[in-house]
Amino acid sequence: MPLSLVDHLFVLYLAIAAPLHSVVDFRKLTERVAANDPSARRAFYRSWIAWSWIPVFGLLAFCWYMNRPMSELGMGFSVGTGFWISLALMLLLCGLMAGEVTMLRQNPEKMQAMRSGLEPILPMFPRDRQESLEFSLMGISAGICEEIIYRGYLMFYVSNIMSFAEPFLSILLSSVVFGLGHAYQGLRGILKTGVIGAIFAGLYWLSGSIWVPILLHIAIDITSGAMSKSLLAANEDAIDASTSEESITN
């Protein structure tokens, strides 16, 4: 299916403007959190949700205008061998993730090590029930919208530009752009999310449907929010214990 100028401009937005916007938005969040603004995280979540859905609605409207079938974005549903294999892999990954979370909660040292690795993005993690709810809504929005854009649309775009190297380049390039979309997490975050994006892309290619990676994406984001509360609680306990020891020593 032929691509238009709008397609190329949208991909430029995904590769350049969206990463820059994420960096600026996250920097504003850290400044507001540092200033003890109680509404900082909720405002960040709501902004992120809006900026997840606006491009998706625009993309769907454009595809409707261009008479492109939604199956081009992976929004069809075909139950075959590939679908069942991808679904089994998705459930296996969810099980491994749940097991890792359980082990981490039972190991304070690993919890602290994990917290150190997440230090650059800790300001975005929820602290109370209301923030946890809105973080979960952000995770659901990201799971749906990012999969439609970065897997459904972007792999469609790459396959139309470079059909001679399918599906490798579609998986690779869509994952690179997905990683760049998380530029606010720094280089390590870009690489990590790029690898995760390749897993999502592999599941999409295997199943032929965007719904399997959507479910895994949502599960990862919601688990991250729940896990962050444990990480923050463990850190507060460590600080309290350290303070108590200093008081006894003094």
Image: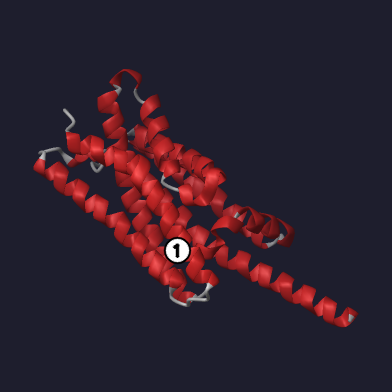
Q: Is residue 163 left or right of residue 225?
A: left
In the image, residue 52 lies at what x, y percent? 32, 55
Which is more toward the observer, 192 or 82? 192
Q: Vertically, is 216 above or below 106?
A: above
Residue at which label 1 appears: 28
In the image, residue 191 lies at what x, y percent? 52, 40
Name the quadrant of the C terminus: bottom right
Residue 199 can be seen in this image? yes
Residue furthest right as drawn: 249
Badge 1 element: helix
In the image, residue 196 lies at what x, y percent? 48, 42
Q: Vertically, is 209 above or below 25?
A: above
Amino acid type at mark 1: Lys
| Residue name at image x 34 percent, y 23 percent | 166
Which is more toward the observer, 78 or 136? 136
Name the quadrant of the N terminus: top left
Q: In this view, does 55 lie to the left or right of 19?
A: left
| Residue name at image x 15 percent, y 44 percent | 62
Residue 125 can be seen in this image? no
How is the model colour-coded? secondary structure
| Residue name at image x 42 percent, y 50 percent | 217
